[in-house]
Amino acid sequence: HPEPVSSLSAPDLLAECYANLEIPVGSNRATIKKAWKTQMKKYHPDLHCADPEKKRIAEELTRQLTQAHQILDTALLKKARGENNGRF
């Protein structure tokens, strides 16, 4: 299961996001998107709607996965544009 994205330094945060999506550090945008979609299908809350506790956990996991995807995608876009100011 993904770990919560916490207030870590930028490199540690990115590494944690890659780990949450279960992909190698440095993966490209296409790999990140594919991993996010795969994980979202696996943990989608609608698959667990019969059990309220499992649904709650699935909702939290999908939130964390989406956050990881957004952080990595934004970081890679900024890197490609040269807007990272040395942070990533």
Image (cartoon, rainbow, N blue to C red):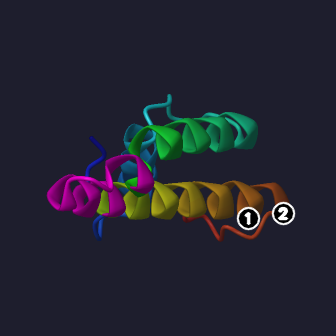
Taking depth in this image into account, of 46 and 43 the one nearest to the observer is 46
Above or below 23: residue 66 = below
Locate the N terminus by quadrant: top left
Residue lying furthest front in this view? 50
x, y percentage for residue 32?
Answer: 62, 41
x, y percentage for residue 22?
Answer: 43, 32
The reply to whether discs 2 and 1 touch (Cβ–Cβ < 8 Å) is: yes
Between the residue at mark 2 and the residue at mark 1, the CA separation in whole angstroms equals 5 Å
The mark tally for this picture is: 2
Q: Amino acid at mark 1?
A: Lys
Quickly name the residue at label 1.
78
Locate the C terminus by quadrant: bottom right
Residue lying furthest top in this view? 24
Taking depth in this image into account, of 48 and 43 the one nearest to the observer is 48
Is residue 44 among the parts visible in the rendering? yes
| Magenta stretch, residue numbers | 46-59
Residue 81 circle label: 2
**Secondary structure beneath label 2:** helix
Q: For residue 82, which quarter of the picture?
A: bottom right
Label 2 Cα neighbours within 10 Å, binned few <14 / some 14-19 / many ≥20? few
Q: Is residue 71 magenta?
A: no
Taking depth in this image into account, of 65 and 77 the one nearest to the observer is 65
